[in-house]
Image (cartoon, rainbow, N blue to C red):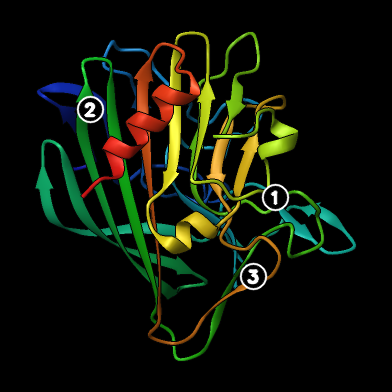
Amino acid sequence: MTGNNSAVLRVAGRPVGRYVIRPELPARLSPRPYLHPVTTLAGTVVTELSPADHTHHLGVGVAVPDVEGHNFWGGRTFVRDQGPTELDNHGSQRHTAFQLRDPDGFVEELRWVAGGADLLRERRTVAATELTDDAWALDLTFSLTNVTSGELSIGSPATNGRPGAAYGGFFWRARKESGAPDVFTADKEGEADVHGRSADWLALAGSTWTLVFAGATDDTRRDPWFVRTEEYPGVGSSLAHDERLPVPPGETVVRRVVTVVADGRLDRNVAAALVRKAVSP
């Protein structure tokens, strides 16, 4: 990995992602480190950065729309009984240091800052591993610690009154193509049947690529998936699905998502086999 403001993530010597450490972005986009472009081993780009439909979607990263009223997602804030509203409430994630930095991954310390104060401290661990000649895995763990003297809580548009919009946490803005990607789990398929539900893994398949997302801890597996295919292609976790997630002073929320990045369109059996290989100890 090289550079002060960006780093290249490699698998078996091949570049598969660029991590932007200190992005220069307007406050409205909730500036934060992100991975883009992320590619398959054959070189197909499977992320998007600030697309026209949602300029605050920044490749792969961690984003939360409501931390005690502060927006770390970007864009408008959903206000109960009012709807999406432009507010001056955007926070930023600020890189502090790398505890470890290798070609195939890193351990990073970050500060979540809003209103001139630190709200959360994050430790982010990212690792890239080769699975087969056609697939690799991106392993991302984030740990959020409340560094204030009072209780914080994490919310979402859903907990603020917008049904079906419980996004917040890990988020992957995928490649947009002429047709919507297919989405499926081990026993369901289609956005309507997989969105807002928990599943051990969930696959998003485009024209020549497949992403398979898996929660790799008990808490992560319990989080429902946030899924979009028709409006735009994106998959994320839902830290606050039915109710706000409390984070008492000094306490830490930990989530781990492993994503298989594969060339070709995988079927259920192959997707499941690659997930097992990716998350095995």
Kindly indicate the quadrant of the structure image that contains residue 105.
top left
**Residue type indicated by callout 2:** Leu
Check disc 3 and report its element: helix, strand or loop: loop
**Residue type indicated by callout 3:** Gly
Taking 111 as reference, is 182 left or right? right
* CA gap, disc 1 and disc 2: 39 Å
Taking 203 as reference, is 88 left or right? right
Taking 59 as reference, is 182 left or right? right
Taking the spot 21% from the left edge, 15% from the top edge, the residue there is 133
**Disc 1 to disc 2: CB gap under 8 Å:** no
Q: According to the image, label 2 marks what residue?
A: 131
**Residue type indicated by callout 1:** Arg
Taking the spot 46% from the left edge, 57% from the top edge, the residue there is 220
Q: How many marks?
A: 3
| Horizontal and vertical percent position of residue 97 | 19, 59
Kindly indicate the quadrant of the structure image that contains residue 152.
bottom right
Can residue 191 be seen here? The reply is yes
Check disc 1 and report its element: helix, strand or loop: loop
The one nearer the camera, 197 or 38, is 197
Taking the spot 46% from the left edge, 13% from the top edge, the residue there is 265
Q: According to the image, label 1 marks what residue?
A: 76
* CA gap, disc 3 and disc 1: 12 Å
Check disc 2 and report its element: helix, strand or loop: strand
For label 2, the crowd category at 10 Å Cα-Cα, with few meaning under 14, some 14 to 19 and many 20 or more, is some
The one nearer the camera, 235 or 215, is 215
Taking 190 as reference, is 148 left or right? left
| Horizontal and vertical percent position of residue 159 | 73, 64
Taking the spot 65% from the left edge, 71% from the top edge, the residue there is 244
Q: According to the image, label 3 marks what residue?
A: 69
For label 3, the crowd category at 10 Å Cα-Cα, with few meaning under 14, some 14 to 19 and many 20 or more, is some
Q: Earlier in the sequence, mark 2 or mark 3?
A: 3
Q: Residue placed farthest to the bottom in the image? A: 149
